[in-house]
């Protein structure tokens, strides 16, 4: 915390008045809340790692039979570029560039998130068709739980984006909406962080 009682990197800027002060406390609190979500993902990461052996894979196909790294790379690009796109939302908000620009950036983020989900669901369907269903083995159960939970989070983020666009359209950029945009940004970047772990442990390690 800085000398003035504010958390560096979470502020909107003094020109935003009360929203600037509220975002400091509310967004930091939301980040602390997300740490409980991180614990859940940590448990699922540990579960996945514990099944990542021949015994854990008995009963079903393994990573080399199911994973399409080209598709995974495309998903990664969609999600990480979506995280970069949210920086456009944050900058447009902080420097008062108007509702239209913020909504445009939000739509870019939602589109990239939808692209990610399209390829992920496509992969799940293909894997299920090859016998890679959750009940086939302990490894597959942990894989579907971890990757599927992240996908549900991405879907939730997209729905949150559209709900926020609706609020911007009806309420304008009042203090409440500004703080909610900041919270949404923390959540959207959190999804990138989790995906980096999934990409590394789930997809790269088994094929190394």
Image: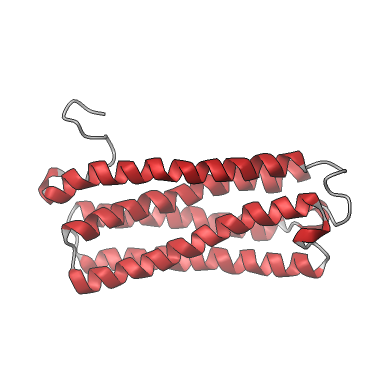
Give how far across and how far down residue 198 sits, in percent.
Answer: 62, 47
Instruction: Report the number of numbered marks.
Output: 0
Quarter location, residue 32:
top left
> At 23% from the left edge and 47% from the top edge, which residue is drawn?
23
Q: Is residue 111 left or right of residue 10?
A: right
> At 34% from the left edge and 63% from the top edge, which residue is drawn?
105
Question: In the rendered view of the protein, which quadrant contains the N terminus?
Answer: top left
Hey, which residue is sitting farthest top in the picture? 3
Quarter location, residue 147:
bottom right
Q: Nearer the viewer, residue 189 or 164?
A: 164
Q: In the rendered image of this protein, does residue 177 appear above or below residue 193? A: below
> At 38% from the left edge and 43% from the top edge, which residue is drawn?
31
Is residue 205 something one can see in this rendering?
yes
Q: Is residue 9 left or right of residue 189?
A: left
Q: Nearer the viewer, residue 130 or 92?
A: 130
Quarter location, residue 165:
bottom left
Q: Nearer the viewer, residue 127 or 98?
A: 127
Q: Is residue 198 left or right of residue 114?
A: right
> At 82% from the left edge and 66% from the top edge, which residue is drawn?
130
Question: In the rendered view of the protein, which quadrant contains the C terminus?
Answer: top right
Give how far across and how far down residue 100 sits, in percent.
Answer: 24, 69
């Amino acid at each position: 915390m800085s000398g003035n009682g504010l958390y560096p990197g979470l502020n909107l800027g003094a020109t935003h008045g009360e929203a600037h002060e509220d975002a400091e406390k509310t967004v930091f609190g939301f980040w602390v809340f997300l740490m409980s979500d991180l614990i859940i993902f940590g448990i699922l990461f540990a579960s996945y790692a514990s099944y990542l052996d021949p015994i854990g894979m008995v009963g079903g196909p393994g990573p080399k039979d199911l994973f399409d790294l080209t598709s995974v790379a495309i998903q990664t690009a969609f999600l990480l570029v979506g995280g970069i796109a949210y920086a456009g939302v944050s900058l447009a908000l902080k420097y008062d560039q108007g509702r239209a620009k913020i909504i445009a950036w939000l739509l870019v983020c939602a589109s990239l998130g939808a692209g990610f989900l399209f390829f992920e669901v496509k992969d799940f369907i293909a894997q299920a068709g090859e016998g890679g269903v959750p009940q086939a083995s302990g490894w597959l159960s942990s894989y579907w739980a971890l990757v599927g939970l992240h996908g549900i989070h991405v879907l939730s983020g997209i729905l949150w984006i559209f709900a926020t666009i609706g609020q911007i359209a009806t309420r304008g950029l009042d203090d409440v909406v500004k703080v909610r945009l900041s919270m949404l940004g923390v959540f959207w970047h959190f999804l990138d962080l989790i995906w980096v772990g999934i990409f590394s442990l789930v997809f790269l390690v088994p094929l190394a």
